Image (cartoon, helix red, strand yellow):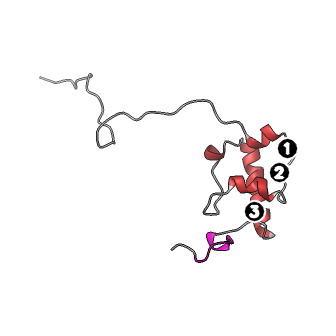
Amino acid sequence: MVTEPQRNEEPQGDRPDDRPRKRRFGRRRPCPVCVARMKTVDYKDVGFLRRFISDRARMEPRRKVGACAKHQRAIARAIKRARHVALLPYTVEHIRGQSSPAR
């Protein structure tokens, strides 16, 4: 006799309480550059670029910022240029106002 696997069994989840994960699908956030109708992303506009840098001086990912792919590349390029001319920090130690960096 060959036994067939039961088809009504639910797969075991990877969560400790075996609840299924909730997926978050919804409307994407509009691109901040497209909304502002900017022609180009300028590396000298430090106030605008600071919105795309975390408190750890890292560039925020596209899924968090909500930028389209074209403008995310332009934002990354502008941040790198601003860092090169010392308008933006590379690391946390470069941020002014901190007495000692957290380690």
**At 61% from the left edge and 46% from the top edge, which residue is drawn?**
64
Q: Disc 2 designates what residue?
A: 41
Q: How far apart are marks 2 and 3 (CA)?
A: 12 Å
| Label 3 environment density (alpha carbons within 10 Å; few <14, some 14–19, many ≥20) | some
**Membership of 93 in magenta stretch:** yes
Q: Is the magenta stretch mostly helix, strand or loop?
A: loop
Inspect the magenta stretch and tell me whether residue 56 lies in it. no
**In this figure, which residue is indicated by the disc labeled 3?**
80
Residue range corresponding to the magenta coloring: 92-100
Place of residue 88 in the rendered image (x, y in percent of width and height, measured from the top left) = 74, 65
Which of pointers 2 and 3 lies earlier in the amino acid sequence?
2
Q: Name the residue under label 1.
A: 38
Name the amino acid, label 3.
Answer: Lys
Task: Please determine whether, in this image, residue 26 is positioned above or below residue 82.
Answer: above
Residue lying furthest right in this view? 39
Q: Residue 97 appears at what percent x and percent y?
A: 66, 72
Residue drawn at point x = 84 percent, y = 54 percent: 42
In the picture shown, does residue 21 fall above or below 86? above
* Label 3 element class: helix
Q: Which amino acid is tagged 2?
A: Val
> Quadrant of residue 67 in the image?
top right
